[in-house]
Amino acid sequence: MILKKLTVGQLFTNCYIFGSDEHVVIIDPGGDSNVIIKSVDEEFNAKPIAVLLTHGHFDHSTKVGRIKRNYQIPLMYNKKEYDSGIFSQIEADRWLEEGDTIEIDDITLHVLETPGHSPGSLTFYSKDVKQLNGIKCDGIIFTGDLLFRRSIGRSDFGGGDQGLLFSSIKTKIMYNSNLTDNFLIFPGHMGNTSIGEERRMNMFKTYFL
């Protein structure tokens, strides 16, 4: 399995290269396309098969076109993000909705619609990762700018809604029967965490528990 975090762009966005040893997806290429391409080409013997967006804000999407053209791969995100005007530069090759899956060889990424930071925000999770850097887990989850280590995403941008954001965290993550406290969280900014840690330590936990 491959999971590489690259911090890119002016706002230090986490871009992820994730997948099997043969194929990967690139999540949120928000800047520094040369760094992303170099990492894929020189560090791994794996072929990119898609670009995924958790949401369309510029710091997560600026280099979508460059990555897509370089590898001739499809772009996937939520149509609500396009229709809202948050990201309308490039239409998706595949629109993603709640319940969709993305297959990366023997790894399945599940799609959750988690609005609040933006209308079409998505979260991706997989139950197929059971250990990472020696740490046992029940799976991993990419939360974009929905949920951070000890914090939450902003909701004061256009299309943001704080009530929806708390509802998304509560219903789609904290009380999702498919997820456990032992899922590792990989957010759109800052460091990694886990669902269990955020239940205990997040400063906003009373709003989503």
Image (cartoon, helix red, strand yellow):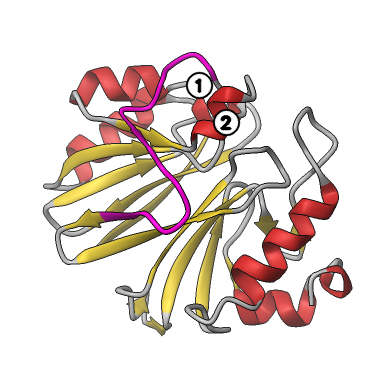
- Marks 2 and 1, how far apart in space? 15 Å
Magenta residues?
A: 88-102
Q: Position of residue 105 (x, y in %)?
A: 14, 59
The residue carrying pointer 2 sits among few (fewer than 14), some (14 to 19) or many (20 or more) residues within 10 Å by Cα, namely many
Q: Is residue 66 magenta?
A: no
Q: Along the horizontal axis of the image, is 155 left or right of 119?
A: right
Q: Amino acid at mark 2?
A: Glu
Name the image quarter holding the N terminus.
Answer: bottom left
Residue 175 is drawn in which quadrant?
Answer: bottom right
In primary-sequence order, the first of circles 2 and 1 is 1
Give the residue type at disc 1: Thr
Residue 101: within the magenta? yes
Question: Residue beneath label 1, please?
Answer: 62
Q: Please name which of the two marks, 2 or 1, marks the residue nearer to the observer.
A: 2
Please report the residue visible at 34 percent of the width from the left and 60 percent of the height from the top. Answer: 109
Figure check: 152 above or below 133: above
Q: Residue at x 35, y 23 (%)?
A: 34
Where is 170 relative to 44, above or below?
A: below
